[in-house]
Amino acid sequence: MKQFVSLITAFVFAAAPQLDASAAAKHPPSKANIVKAKAAKAGKPAKGKSGKSAPPSKAPKARKALAAAAAVAAVAAASSIDYDGEQVNFAEWQAVREFISEMVIKHDFDRAVLEAQLRQVRFVESAVQLVKPAPPGKPKNWQAYSERFIEPIRINAGLRFWNENAAALARAEATYGVPAEIIVGIIGVETIYGRDTGRFRVLDTLTTLAFAYPEAPNKAARSIFFRAELENAFLLARHENIDPFTLLGSFAGAVGMPQFMPGNILKYGVDFDGDGHIDLRGSTADAIGSVANFLIEHGWNPRDAGPYAVRVDVAAHQAWEPLLERGLAATLRSDELAAAGVVPATPLPAERLYGLVDLQNGAEATEYWVANDNFFAITKYNRSYFYAMSVIDLGRAVRAARAGQTL
């Protein structure tokens, strides 16, 4: 069985101040919301067993030892985090008890160990605040967004990362057909090449968001998503034989240099350095291979060697506006774009499909682009045109810096 990461590599880098994940560590918990969270629990702790015969390792004494070890590990892991959390005893919440029962029945987890672990989980108010949608009225601004990522610190860090990992990047490009600059762009935008991988305990944030997601139109769907990721976090820890409390990540539960959710580690994580581990926190090779694998599994087309996006002008009659509603996919032929009044800066190959992209600039004029399959594959990593364009621009900037460096 592969190991995800040894306990020795459980430590992650301190958060850099530029990124949103680091800001989450600075919000103290709101007592009013803690009271609301406590009110959500109901009933008494679950009684009885799953009905299955326990193997020798799950005998009462062994279970008590495991539960005690989990509590000790939770205290030790707390020294690695930099946020305040509220001890609310999630194990007593009705919905959490149902989750525990499902894990016992569906995956043969030990009830006593899960209960002990979930009693140590903290309610994280800052995670609740950070998942709330931005207040309405503030216009999107592509130029301001871009300046956060296409700047000297990140470009220089990317140059070092590319130089130090040139062999792994070249091998990933040959294996998956994803250019090195795109992999470099993603890891740079996500964590500044491992500098800011997050200092939240994944169990804390995922449990909080699964069972105390804030009121919002999408609350039900998001609660289901985070509940599934909490399940995946426990499965990942068991599969890789690590203490789940050593998994640290973003306020939303994303882990490692490429910020994969636990479910994506299980689906798309790659042991690219061949050491028998999938370690997205300590192995740059595994991070590189996993990013490339994720993209190829989400529609990256190695045969499309054209530009990811081409700047366009749009006609005043605005017949092109409905094309913006086609979703995150390349579905439009070049003649369809032309008929709607979309005029590219350079001719588009007729055999390719495209999507129309708008990059709003606040009070300034919106930029319009047409993008190919590979641009939209990047949006599967983060569902944002701004994100995909920043990945492309950062990768291009690092590649240019590398071409101009003194060797």
Image: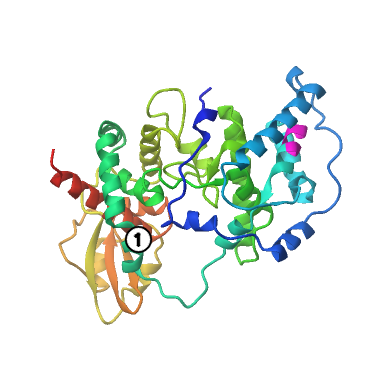
Q: Position of residue 116 (x, y in %)?
A: 75, 37
Observer able to see residue 342:
no
> Which residue is situated farthest in the front direction here?
79
In terms of secondary structure, where does tag 1 sit? Answer: helix
Q: Main secondary structure of the magenta part?
A: helix
- Quadrant where the C terminus is found in the figure: top left
Give the left or right position of residue 374, taking residue 71 as reference. Answer: left
Count of numbered badges drawn on the protein:
1
122, 3: nearer the viewer = 122
Observer able to see residue 147:
yes
Which residue does the image show at 28% across and 69% down from the upper left? 368
Which residue is label 1 attached to? 148
Which residue does the image show at 49% across and 32% down from the upper left? 9
Q: Position of residue 50 (x, y in %)?
A: 80, 32
Question: Residue 222 appears in which quarter of the rendering?
Answer: bottom right
User: Is residue 335 one of those drawn in magenta?
Assistant: no
Against 214, residue 45 (above or below) is: above
Against 94, residue 107 (above or below) is: above
Which residue does the image show at 36% across and 64% down from the upper left? 145
Q: Position of residue 378 (x, y in %)?
A: 36, 51
Give the left or right position of residue 314, taking residue 42 as reference. Answer: left
Question: Which three-letter amino acid code belongs to the residue tagged 1?
Answer: Arg
Give the extent of the magenta segment.
111-116
Give the left or right position of residue 317, taking residue 327 as reference. Answer: left
Q: Position of residue 239 (x, y in %)?
A: 58, 29
